[in-house]
């Protein structure tokens, strides 16, 4: 009785059992009351039988009375007894005063008696008693018919199904909570019900998803920082030792400044993306012109491209209004452009284009470099992943730029993908455009 299932099952079954038994009980009580009520049809029928038995006895004697009682037994399957005023059977001469005493007892609760039912009537002149004795063939309480037992059996099955239906999602939720508590952050209740229990399960799923996201973002941040800070910190230590020795002090200080700036930029990018992943509700949703942002990034990338001996051109521009965090989108697109510049051959051009396609704004960045092996394309946006031939940090970067770009674009419900175009690598970013809002007046589509 400690489980909710058992409590619900027992509660509903007891309620239905009380209803069925009570209904049968009241029906039986009504029948008994009809017999005790002298004006009721059943009582008047017994009175009629008394008069018929008396008439048969007085006119035809014992043979006529015996014939009447036999007919009564055959038709009603009940026994009839006619006695004199003292209770002696006029047919057999047997003393039946016990029937007179039973008839004189209180009839307040006649339905609780065990054995045959007795209905007695006294002649108006007091000379005769007539007793109508009916058997009670039902197994168990006499007021319950087999139909009542069948109804209660069906009620038990329905109650079992109802209790199972109500407690099944609770058991599933309990198992999901236990798994989640043991560290399985992927545990979900997965309920499709539309009632309160389904809402509770979906609330738990949202909570579990939120906690999983927060913990995953925290672990990713710790992994990223612990993985990537070691090398800059080691180089900082070497530069500090060189500065202390006094040899080539300017070079050591420049190296310290360079590594500090590198660490600051790295931590800033990681923290910003991790914060947005951990709390998607904190992500800014400002309307912005994506084509204008790309224009600014193309202009700002000119100096870096010139240092690598290449150029960045805005090959095609279509206006597009998107909604999101300007700084995150800036970092995502900038990382893709800088990655293209890093691998662009000298005297080549990195082509950047914006377009609108099927309700999305598309930013396309293509370089003229060697591309990447086809088997490396699926992992190109993984953190710290770099193609084997480019694992030199002086040229290959730290392997976080495209990973941060992917995470930033996915936070904006967009997608990012790469493909070889021979020559070069093409990276395509898709971001949903703002629906129902037009572009500023005078903008050329």
Image (cartoon, rainbow, N blue to C red):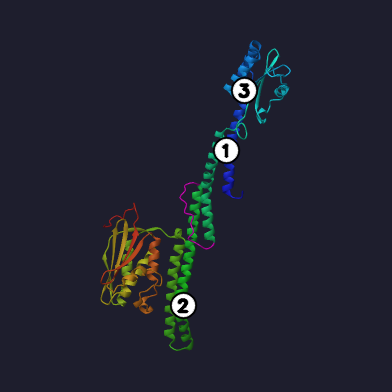
Q: Earlier in the sequence, mark 2 or mark 3?
A: 3
- Mark 3 secondary-structure assignment: helix
- Mark 1 secondary-structure assignment: helix
Q: Do the numbered discs 1 and 3 sit on residues whose CB atoms are within 8 Å?
A: no
Q: Nearer the viewer, mark 1 or mark 3?
A: 3
- Mark 2 secondary-structure assignment: helix
Q: Residues within 10 Å of mark 1 (few under 14, many from 20)?
A: some
Considering depth in this image, is 210 or 104 the residue closer to the camera? 104
Tag of residue 34? 3
**Residue placed furthest toward the top:** 59
Q: Is residue 186 magenta?
A: yes
Q: Which residue is mark 2?
A: 230
Q: Residues within 10 Å of mark 2 (few under 14, many from 20)?
A: few
Q: Which residues are magenta?
A: 182-195
- CA distance for labels 1 and 3: 27 Å
Please provide percent x and percent y for residue 341: 31, 73
């Amino acid at each position: 009785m400690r489980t909710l299932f058992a409590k619900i099952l027992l509660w509903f079954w007891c309620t239905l059992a009380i209803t069925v038994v009570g209904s049968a009980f009241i029906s039986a009580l009504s029948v008994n009351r009809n017999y005790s009520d002298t004006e009721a049809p059943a009582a008047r029928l017994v009175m009629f039988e008394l008069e018929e038995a008396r008439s048969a006895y007085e006119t035809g004697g014992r043979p006529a009375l015996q014939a009447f009682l036999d007919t009564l037994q055959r038709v009603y399957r009940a026994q009839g007894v006619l006695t004199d005023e003292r209770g002696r059977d006029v047919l057999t001469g047997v003393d039946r005063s016990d029937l007179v005493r039973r008839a004189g007892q209180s009839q307040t609760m006649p339905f609780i008696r065990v054995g045959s039912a007795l209905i007695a009537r006294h002649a108006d002149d007091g000379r005769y008693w007539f007793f109508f004795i009916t058997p009670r063939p039902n197994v168990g309480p006499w007021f319950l018919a087999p139909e009542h037992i069948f109804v209660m059996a069906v009620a038990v099955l329905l109650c079992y199904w109802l209790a199972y239906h109500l407690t099944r999602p609770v058991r599933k939720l309990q198992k999901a909570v236990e798994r989640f508590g043991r560290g399985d952050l992927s545990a979900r209740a997965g309920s499709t019900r539309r009632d309160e229990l389904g809402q509770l399960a979906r609330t738990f799923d949202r909570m579990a998803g939120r906690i999983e996201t927060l913990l995953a973002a925290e672990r990713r941040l710790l992994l990223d920082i612990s993985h990537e800070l070691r090398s800059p910190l080691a180089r900082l230590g070497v530069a500090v030792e060189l500065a202390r020795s006094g040899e080539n002090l300017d070079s050591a200080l420049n190296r310290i400044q360079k590594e500090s700036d590198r660490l600051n930029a790295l931590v800033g990018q990681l923290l910003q993306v991790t914060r947005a992943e951990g709390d998607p509700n904190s992500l800014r949703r400002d309307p912005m012109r994506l084509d204008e942002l790309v224009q600014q990034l193309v202009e700002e990338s000119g100096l870096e491209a010139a240092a690598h001996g290449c150029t960045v051109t805005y090959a095609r521009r279509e206006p597009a209004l998107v909604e999101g965090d300007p700084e995150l989108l800036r970092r995502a697109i900038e990382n893709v452009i800088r990655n293209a510049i890093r691998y662009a051959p000298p005297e080549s051009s990195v082509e950047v284009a914006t377009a609108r396609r099927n309700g999305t704004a598309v930013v396309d960045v293509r370089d003229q470099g060697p591309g990447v092996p086809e088997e490396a394309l699926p992992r190109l946006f993984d953190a710290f992943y770099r193609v084997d031939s480019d694992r030199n940090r002086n040229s290959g970067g730290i392997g976080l730029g495209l990973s941060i770009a992917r995470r930033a674009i996915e936070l904006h419900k967009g997608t990012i993908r790469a493909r070889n175009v021979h020559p070069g690598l093409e990276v395509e970013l898709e971001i949903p455009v703002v629906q129902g809002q037009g572009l500023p007046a005078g903008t050329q589509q």
